[in-house]
Amino acid sequence: MSGFGVTPIGRVESSLTDPASAPKQGHEGAPDAWLVLEPSVLDALDGIRPGARLIVLTWFHRARRDLLRVHPRDDPANPMQGVFNTRSADRPNPIGLHEVEVLAVQGERVQVRPLEAIDGTPIVDVKPAL
Amino acid sequence: MSGFGVTPIGRVESSLTDPASAPKQGHEGAPDAWLVLEPSVLDALDGIRPGARLIVLTWFHRARRDLLRVHPRDDPANPMQGVFNTRSADRPNPIGLHEVEVLAVQGERVQVRPLEAIDGTPIVDVKPAL
């Protein structure tokens, strides 16, 4: 099958810099962070206000795309599972999903919480949580 | 920013063939459908069983990627909104999110419900719902 091209629409700005020590899920103690969007997509934020719940899609640019089975949560004590049955960053298309609350909107900068993605992670989409 | 390449991991097999008449969300009367995965990613399904709740990520291959504001639900009576504040298929990276329940697993074929994606829609990821 032929593929598709994903263009980052922005980057995560966060105090988290080390993937190994970052929380694995947002609700596990992840900090506030900023979505810093490209000025060219500013109009796409129209209507997003503090208090909104969003789903942020990121691209795990450091992930391995050739792994189909992993130990969940990187713990060898957990039996191997197919990556589609885990939230591992390692997967054929390493897209991350993060449900967050909007704290502030300042132009193309959106403050959210909680977000476990590390600083510099590319953002590929933002949607309202349903 | 440079981009990334997404490779479809399978396709949707569905009785829905017309995007114009398909439900806009799964809970709006969408039918059962099959995820037909590539044999090469079969191992990644390991552990997925009937009754599981999954999030399926698709690629809206017919979407427009140049629209930043739309009338929600294609209704001109709705004021224009930024696409990041809507679930419109038209968006810079046209990735769809669908929460479904697994009905059956037969090799690389996974029956799910409800799914509003039309027949032939590329699938780019599958994750457990949290």
Image: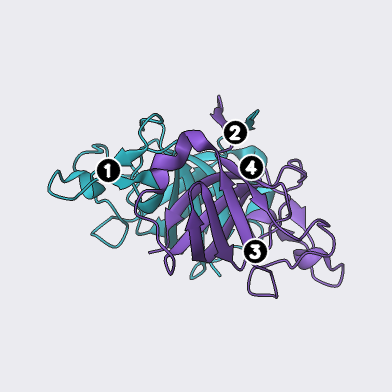
Chain colours: A purple, B cyan
Q: Amino acid at mark 4?
A: Asn
Which chain is home to disc 1?
A: B
Which circle marks residue B7 in the picture? 2
Find the distance from the CA under tag 4 to the CA under tag 2: 7 Å
**Host chain of mark 2:** B
Badge 4 marks a residue whose secondary structure is loop
Q: Describe the element under mark 2 as helix, strand or loop.
A: loop
Q: Nearer the viewer, mark 1 or mark 2?
A: 2
Give the mark, 3 or 1, whose residue is nearer the N terminus.
1
Q: Position of residue A114 (x, y in %)?
A: 61, 68
Q: State if disc 3 and disc 2 touch (CB < 8 Å).
A: no
**Residue under the image location 37 percent in, 37 percent down:** B68
For image coordinates 27% across by 43% down, the residue present is B16
Disc 1 residue type (three-letter) = Leu
Residue depth check, mark 1 versus mark 4: number of the one nearer the observer: 4
Circles 1 and 4 on the same subunit: no
Q: Are marks 4 and 2 in contact (CB under 8 Å)?
A: yes
Where is residue A39 shown, x and y percent of the image? 51, 37
Q: Which residue is mark 1?
A: B16
- Please name the residue shown 78% across and 62% down the image: A80
Measure the alpha-carbon separation of dots 1 and 4: 25 Å
In the drawing, what numbered circle is on residue A93?
4
Instruction: Confirm whether residue B106 shows in the render.
Output: no
| Marks 1, 2 in one chain | yes
Residue A60, image x and y in percent? 69, 47
Question: CA separation, marks 1 and 2?
Answer: 23 Å
